[in-house]
Image (spheres, helix red, strand yellow):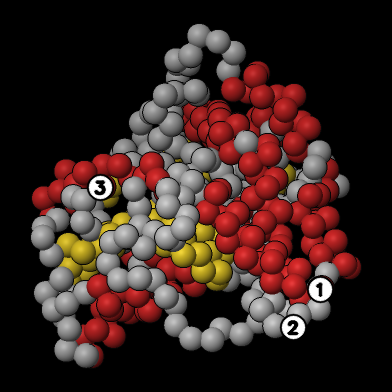
């Protein structure tokens, strides 16, 4: 694969930076014989996040929105400040108008939009487009909403988002053909959790026109690359905090509040996950500090190295995204996720063999919706703490398996 840029590669340019960043992850430096290659499932936490949690729990832990003593006030302020932090992180074009709702993760975020907000948007005969080859968290909630509406006599159509296996992106031409005036919402994924494709969201907007709502599942992009909801022109942005280096049980829905009814998730939801929210603010600060643009260049470069290496091994098939894989390519289609299969060795067995060499990867169906089911495969998902040496060792082990 040719390198398009004339200057130093991302790996050469960012090597010293990456070493210093990697040193900030105690679980990584504490286990030099292991390689964590499952960051699409959850990301490891830098020391800054661990410190923020420790500081909060030892200096200000209280409930939020209740009580008027200093710890309670501090907790309330931290929760509110984190909403603004999220707005800034996502490049919110109109922060005074948007809403930020905390959830336990992307799944709960998507479910909340589909259950609490979508029924107010749709009337009999409307259509929504759902990405049937993506994560089931971005499919089931929409189907459930359709069933819920049908019980009330409102029949809406759910159409599968056309997808192209070879390019690893949605088929925008087919989307433009199927979209019409009754297409009210398109649920899309920013980075595919199996194929690693960075989906072209601009082309979705072009295909469906200015009035349709776009709900973006950014679970695999937030924390991995710069995400600008202003640039992407989406109405919802949903992500999981734990994949963005915060604690598990955190996530958020960002809602622009421009197309359709206002997003006001219903009812009293009790005590928020204050510690998680504190960790999320710390994680976003940390990510902005190191730079999501550099994280993206690093993980894209590692993924390219792995993909190129796998292509040289006859026994392996790389799934999805068969184009634009050059290191530093201006079209960085594939992000830091590479999924593959061995011709003869089952993916479960391959995972077992890889762990015996210290590699932690995911080997199953990856929670993919039935519309894109490829069977079992091995997924390597990268983050800023992964190294060239890990990729080269992995390729060396894979090469010994024929
Ligand atoms: N969407 C995508 C694209 C994902 O990869 C995942 C998690 N693998 C989810 C949604 C669900 O995230 P969570 O489990 O944190 O709710």
The image quadrant that residue 24 belongs to is top right
Position of 371 compared to 387: left or right? left
Question: For residue 165, which numbered disc appears in the image?
Answer: none
Is the Cβ of the residue at disc 3 closer than 8 Å to that at disc 1? no
Q: Residues within 10 Å of mark 2 (few under 14, many from 20)?
A: few
Q: Which residue is mark 2?
A: 67
Vertical side of 74 occupied by 338: above or below: above
Residue nearest the observer in this picture, 269 or 374: 269
Where does residue 132 sit, x and y in percent of width and height? 31, 61
Residue at x-position 81% and y-position 38%: 23
The image quadrant that residue 330 belongs to is top left
Where does residue 78 sit, x and y in percent of width and height? 70, 64
Q: Which residue is mark 1?
A: 71
Q: Residues within 10 Å of mark 3 (few under 14, many from 20)?
A: many
Reading the chain from its start, which is encountered first: label 3 or label 1? Answer: 1
Where does residue 189 sit, x and y in percent of width and height? 39, 53
Element type at marker 3?
helix
Position of 334 compared to 180: left or right? right
Residue at x-position 55% and y-position 48%: 89
Residue at x-position 21% and y-position 85%: 150
Q: Nearest to the eye among marks 3 and 1: give it.
A: 1
Residue at x-position 14% and y-position 56%: 179
- Residue reaching furthest to the right: 58
Element type at marker 1?
helix
Q: Which residue is mark 3?
A: 205
Position of 399 compared to 121: left or right? right
Where does residue 400 sit, x and y in percent of width and height? 63, 35
Q: Is mark 1 within 8 Å of ligand 1?
A: no
Is the Cβ of the residue at disc 1 closer than 8 Å to that at disc 2? yes
């Amino acid at each position: 694969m040719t390198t398009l840029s004339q200057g130093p590669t991302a790996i050469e340019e960012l090597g010293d930076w990456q070493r210093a960043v990697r040193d900030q992850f105690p679980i990584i430096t504490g286990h030099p014989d292991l390689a964590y290659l499952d960051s699409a499932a959850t990301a490891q936490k830098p020391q800054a996040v661990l410190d923020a949690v420790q500081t909060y729990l030892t200096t200000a832990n209280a409930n939020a929105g209740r009580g008027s003593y200093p710890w309670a006030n501090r907790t309330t302020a931290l929760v509110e400040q984190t909403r603004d932090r999220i707005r800034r992180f996502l490049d919110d074009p109109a922060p005074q108008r948007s809403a930020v709702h905390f959830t336990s993760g992307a799944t709960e975020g998507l479910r909340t939009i589909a259950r609490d907000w979508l029924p107010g948007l749709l009337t009999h005969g409307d259509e929504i487009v759902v990405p049937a080859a993506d994560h089931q968290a971005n499919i089931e909630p929409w189907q459930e909403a359709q069933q819920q509406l049908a019980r009330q006599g409102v029949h809406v159509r759910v159409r599968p988002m056309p997808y192209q296996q070879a390019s690893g992106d949605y088929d925008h031409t087919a989307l433009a053909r199927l979209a019409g005036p009754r297409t009210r919402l398109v649920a899309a994924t920013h980075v595919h959790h199996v194929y690693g494709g960075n989906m072209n969201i601009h082309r979705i907007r072009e295909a469906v026109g200015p009035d349709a709502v776009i709900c973006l599942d950014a679970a695999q992009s937030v924390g991995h690359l710069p995400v600008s909801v202003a640039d992407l022109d989406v109405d919802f942005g949903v992500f999981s905090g734990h994949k963005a280096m915060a604690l598990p049980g955190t996530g958020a829905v960002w809602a622009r509040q421009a197309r359709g009814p206002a997003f006001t998730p219903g009812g009293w939801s009790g005590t928020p996950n204050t510690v998680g929210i504190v960790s999320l603010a710390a994680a976003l600060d940390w990510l902005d500090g190191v730079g999501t643009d550099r994280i993206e260049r690093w993980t894209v470069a590692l993924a390219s190295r792995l993909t190129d290496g796998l292509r040289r091994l006859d026994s392996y098939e790389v799934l999805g995204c068969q184009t634009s894989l050059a290191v530093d390519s201006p079209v960085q289609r594939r992000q830091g996720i590479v999924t593959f299969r061995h011709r003869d060795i089952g993916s479960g067995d391959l995972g077992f063999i890889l762990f015996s060499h210290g590699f932690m990867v995911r080997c199953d169906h990856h929670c993919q919706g039935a519309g894109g089911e490829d069977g079992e495969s091995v997924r390597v998902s990268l983050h800023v703490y992964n190294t060239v040496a890990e990729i080269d060792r992995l390729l060396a082990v894979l090469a010994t398996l024929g």
